Amino acid sequence: MVLLLRIISVERTFPPVPANKKPEREFKVGDKIRVNLHHGKIADAVVRAVMHNTDGIKLQVDVVGIDLTALIEEWQIVKE
């Protein structure tokens, strides 16, 4: 009986460890970034607006070389 209690107490001494989250990236108007627009099409873009909401960050960007404004999510950013 004592041995059983000791095993249970050992299991409870290791609390769950939270996963390491990536630090939230900071963006501001005018930042130049590379984005994945559609199925691997990578393009250079300039940030025009930053929107924070409960789902994360969304960026409105102007794509360089194309007359295109896109609303992208943070996971679509390839490189800052």
Image (cartoon, grey):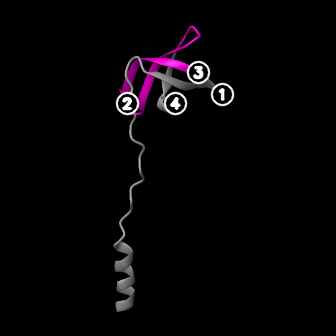
Q: Amino acid at mark 3?
A: Ala
**Residue name at image x 40 percent, y 34 percent:** 25
Residue 2 position by quadrant: bottom left
- Compute the Cα span from label 1 to label 2: 25 Å
Indicate which label's residue lies in the foreground, 1 or 4.
Answer: 4
- Asked if marks 2 and 4 touch (Cβ < 8 Å), the reply is no
Give, as a single range, the part of the protein colored magenta: 44-69
- Asked if marks 3 and 2 touch (Cβ < 8 Å), the reply is no
Indicate which label's residue lies in the foreground, 3 or 1.
Answer: 3
- Compute the Cα span from label 1 to label 4: 16 Å
Screen quadrant of the N terminus: bottom left
Tag 4 or tag 3, which sits nearer the N-term?
3
Q: Which residue is mark 2?
A: 26
Numbered circle sitting on residue 39: 1
**Residue name at image x 37 percent, y 79 percent:** 8
**Residue name at image x 51 percent, y 18 percent:** 45
| Magenta highlight on residue 49 | yes
Tag 4 or tag 1, which sits nearer the N-term?
1
Viewer-nearest residue: 35 or 53: 35
Tag 4 or tag 2, which sits nearer the N-term?
2
Q: Amino acid at mark 2?
A: Glu
Q: Which residue is mark 4?
A: 79
| Magenta highlight on residue 57 | yes
- Asked if marks 1 and 4 touch (Cβ < 8 Å), the reply is no
Q: Main secondary structure of the magenta part?
A: strand
